[in-house]
Image (cartoon, rainbow, N blue to C red):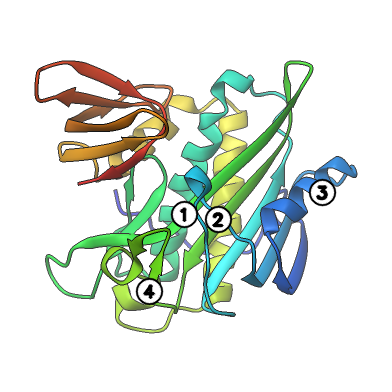
Amino acid sequence: MHYTAAMTTDTPLIGSQIERHAQVGSTNDMVRERARAGAAEGLAIIADEQTKGRGRLGRAWAAPPGGCLLLSALLRPTWLPPADSFLITMLAATALCEAAELAAPQLRARLKWPNDLLLPAAPQPNAPLRKAAGILCELAVERGQIAHVALGIGVNVSWHPQGVVDGRDLGAQATSLGAASGQPVDRERLLAALLTRLDARYAALRRGHRESLFAEWQGRLATLGQQVEVSIPGAGVLRGLAEGVDRNGSLILRGGDGQRHTITAGDVQA
C-alpha cells in the first residue's frame, strides 16, 4: 500500500530534542554515549557526514557531506521484551518507506529483507530496484530489560553512490531518492516526514498494534516470492525461494532440495 498523508513536523517524542553536527564519527555511537549518560528518550542526532558510519553485518557506510540524511534516535522501550526487539527494526523500516513516499510522492518504496529501503534505479517503468537506505538498530539490555536502543538510519538523498566498498560495486547496487524520482528531494522535508512516521509507528507499537505493523512490513518486502541467495555470517550461503517471514521477522527459505530454512540474519541477493 502506498502511504499518503498530510505531512507534519509535530513529533511529540522522537525528535523532541535534536542535535545537528557537520561531521561525526558515528551518530549511533553518539546516541549510545548520550544514553549511557542519561539522555531522555526521543533524542535525535543528525550529521552531514560520518567518518566511521556502519551498517548491518559490520559493513561500512560512507558518503560525501550533505548527500545523505544521517540520523540516529534514542529509544527506551523498557516495555518491550528483548525477545521482541526486532519489532523496532520492523517499525523503522515501515516508517522509512512511508517517509520516502511523503518526501517524493511519485515513488513506491519497497524493502529488501529485513530492512533495506529499495527504490527504482531511475524514474522509468520497470527500472530495477536498488538500495537507497539502510537501518542499524543497536540495543543494550540490562537485568533482562531493554535499557535503550540506538536506531540509526542512513538515506541516500541526492548522492548516487559510486565506487567499491567492502567488495560491493555501489553503482550497480545502490540508488538515491533523487535518482529514483528524477528530481531533487529536500532533505529537511524527508527528515520531518521520517521523524513523524517513526513517532507514530513507535506510539502504535507501544499501544500493542503488532499485527498491523507486521502486515505493513511484510507487504513491503520485495524479497518474498523471489529466488534468492542468502549469505549467512559464519555459515556460508543458502539458495532457494523466499517463501515468507514469521512473526519474529525471520526469513523462511525453501532450498532446492525442499528443505525449509528459518534465517534470522544474513545478506540477501535476488
Q: Quadrant of residue 215?
A: top left
Residue at image point 32% right, 47% down? 112
Q: Residue flagged by tag 3: what amino acid is it?
A: Glu
Q: Which residue is mark 2?
A: 153
Q: Residue flagged by tag 2: what amino acid is it?
A: Ile
Q: Residue flagged by tag 1: what amino acid is it?
A: Gly
Q: Which residue is mark 4?
A: 163
Which one is earlier in the sequence, the residue at label 4 or at label 2? 2
- Residue 66 or residue 106, whichever sits in front: 66
Q: Residues within 10 Å of mark 2 (few under 14, many from 20)?
A: many
Callout 1 secondary element: strand
Which one is earlier in the sequence, the residue at label 4 or at label 3? 3
Q: Is residue 219 above or below residue 60?
A: above
Q: Which residue is mark 3?
A: 33
Which one is earlier in the sequence, the residue at label 2 or at label 1? 1
Q: Which residue is mark 1?
A: 134
